Amino acid sequence: MYVVELQFECFDNTTISAVDKAINGLMDALRYNGQVLGREFPIVLGDGEFFVRAVCPEENSLHPSHHSGFVKHCLRALSDASLLAPKVRLLGRDINSEQAAEARTPSWQILYTTYVHTCSPLRSGDTLLPIPLYRNPPTFNGDHKAVVKWQTEWQACDELQMAGGCRAEHAALHEICDADSVLFRRGWDLRGRIEYLTKVPTYYYQYRVGGSSLADEQARKCPKCGGDWLLDEPVHDIFHFKCDNCRIVSNLSWDHIK
């Protein structure tokens, strides 16, 4: 991933509230299209100009060719706040984050995230590297907001269950573990939509923790079709189960892996 700085210059008198609304609207649009990552974008006030730093999947993530219709609308709306279109300066590579997957079609892909990841939740099945969402056709309504919102909710549940300090832990685990949960069903449906748009086999990750024994874990069946899905060797040292019919991957319970 790469860190960029956006510089917004004023061409006329304006107000802080107008600038705040215009810039944050643009950053939200870029986020929902997968062009910037994360959720917080501090706006720094300069001398007749404003600066925002953000993390992008690639060096060219903010190129106009990647813009969604909503991003283009927000760029035009900057003039309502007396702002010019931003100048983009590439500051360099973020050494604490993963690089994006190569710009080639993978043989398969996975909808997979955790609470510590800020990158795209769509990953190459060949390398497990994140695939920038804007490389693909819009998921729904012109951008990838549905995928980003799903990721945000999944990560919130993951963080709750990892903290394990309140009753909400069990509800959070239900959402990311159980195939009948609202979050699981929505994510699995998004997976299907992405597969339809990209024509690439797309799998959904089922989180697994708990279980009574390693033997019982290894005997687990696919949560949708009830078929056998244990692999001889785990994929990427994470996915011990894979159902090609239902497009689901999962791990052996982390409680039983030494």
Image (cartoon, grey):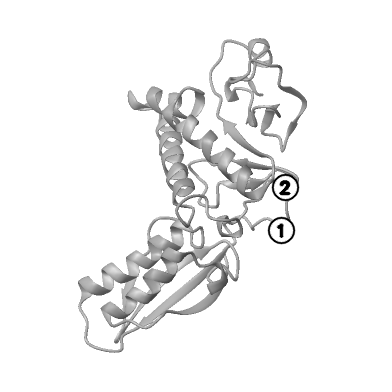
- Quarter-wise, where is residue 21 in the image? bottom left
Q: Residues within 10 Å of mark 2 (few under 14, many from 20)?
A: some
Q: Position of residue 250 (x, y in %)?
A: 62, 28
Label 1 – label 2 distance at C-alpha? 9 Å
Q: Position of residue 177 (x, y in %)?
A: 51, 25
Question: What residue would you read off at disc 2?
Answer: 127
Q: Earlier in the sequence, mark 1 or mark 2?
A: 1
CB atoms at circles 1 and 2 under 8 Å apart? yes
Q: Residue furthest right?
A: 232
- Quarter-wise, where is residue 175 in the image? top left
The residue at the point 63 percent across, 18 percent down is 225
- Does residue 101 sit above or below 242 in this rendering? below
The residue at the point 55 percent across, 29 percent down is 207
| Residue 257 appears left or right of 117 | right
Q: Position of residue 85 (x, y in %)?
A: 41, 80
- SS state under label 2: loop
